[in-house]
Amino acid sequence: MSAARALPEHWRRRGPLACLLWPLSLLFRLVSCVRRAAFRHGLLPVQRLPVPVVVIGNIIAGGAGKTPLTLHLAQALSALGHRPLIVSRGYGGTRDDARQVSPDGDAAECGDEAVLLARRSGVPVWVGRRRADAARAGLAQYPECDVVLCDDGLQHYALARDVEIAVIDRRGLMNGFHLPAGPLREAVSRLAEVDAVVLNGPDAMSFAGAQSYRMTLRGDLFHRLGQPQVTAHAADLRGLRLHALAGIGEPARFFDHLRALGLDFIAHPFADHQAYTAQDLTFADCDALLMTEKDAVKCHGLSDTPVWVLPVEAHLDPDLAGRVSARLVELMHGSPSS
């Protein structure tokens, strides 16, 4: 098993490796607190945009469902009459400059999540190491946009924000240590300060003092990679020799979804943001491959075996988009915060 895949294992419990790294985690926590205080007290510059900013992030390292939530909010807010612009760091991409991401963009340059958002959201998507610069460039080209959605930016304090949303999945906070001994980027108390905590999945634990929303990811219709008009239900794939790949924050979540659809397959977990090669997609006794949309944006042309992609949609209970929309209206009209 690669180091990239094995790393999260010592985050799950307070074992020997986690305890060995614990002193470093105290240093990380101190630096994190000092850094945030520097932004809060004006010692480091904070840029405010001319439109409201909604930040979607988490307090742990790794994926927890931020991108599906960002996609949901972009589509739901658009339906409510808003005109969102999505900004992302473009994690996994090689470019640092501010640039727009096209639906057929190169994930190696812009990041897999950014390309996925550009394909699915229907709104402009910009990436850049400095999110404020990317947002300003996007707003200059799309002046009709009236809200910025910042994907994975909770700790990016150089950008002022009006609404903060934290996502927690069923792994919770694991061993509760800060990096590198555990997954925490910030203290657990940070969750009491955000506007909403989104619990991804029925098994995600809630946190006292935070307004919580339950998110479920649903999807049962596959499409062929490179041929999105060709679709299949799970029943159409049963009986085939299937191999499933997932290079996301928690691959087991995708595999559990497939099992819930009644599919039998051999599971192949990869590191988050895996840069796939043809060898990664080559298996003996394989009739078809199954993968997430995030993986699919990097796999076109890598396999002669049929590849079936499973899109998912986020569903929120209660209605988070409605609450965010109401807050945006307050901000636009100068009303006091609720």
Image (cartoon, rainbow, N blue to C red):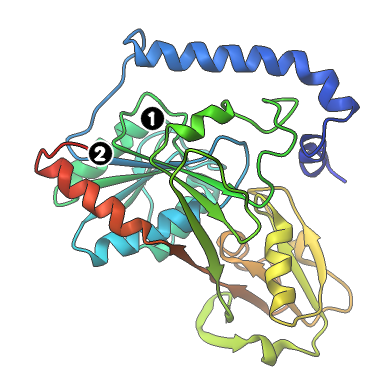
For the residue pair 296 and 188, the one nearer the viewer reads as: 188
Above or below residue 279? Residue 162 is: above
Q: Residues within 10 Å of mark 1 (few under 14, many from 20)?
A: some
Above or below residue 88? Residue 35 is: above
Q: Quadrant of the C terminus?
A: top left
- Does the rendering let one see residue 105? no
User: Where residue 288 is drawn, which disc sits there?
Assistant: none
- Does the rendering let one see residue 300? yes
Dividing the picture into quadrants, the one containing residue 294 is: bottom right
Secondary structure, mark 2, is: helix
Give the residue drawn at x 62%, y 60%: 295
Secondary structure, mark 1, is: loop
Residue 280, x across and y down, in percent: 77, 59
Residue 44, x across and y down, in percent: 36, 12
Q: In the image as oriented, which residue stretches furthest toward the left?
A: 333
Residue 67, x across and y down, in percent: 49, 53
Image side of residue 252 versus residue 53, left or right: right
Give the residue drawn at x 44%, y 36%: 153
Give the residue drawn at x 21%, y 47%: 328
Q: In the image as oriented, which residue stretches furthest toward the top?
A: 43
Residue receiving disc 1: 130
At label 1, the amino acid type is Arg
Residue receiving disc 2: 137
Image side of residue 213 versus residue 277, left or right: left
Image side of residue 308 versus residue 265, left or right: left
Residue 194, x across and y down, in percent: 42, 36
Q: Residues within 10 Å of mark 2 (few under 14, many from 20)?
A: some
For the residue pair 77 and 107, the one nearer the viewer reads as: 77
Cα separation, mark 1 vs mark 2, equals 11 Å
User: Of label 1 and label 2, which has the lower sequence position?
Assistant: 1
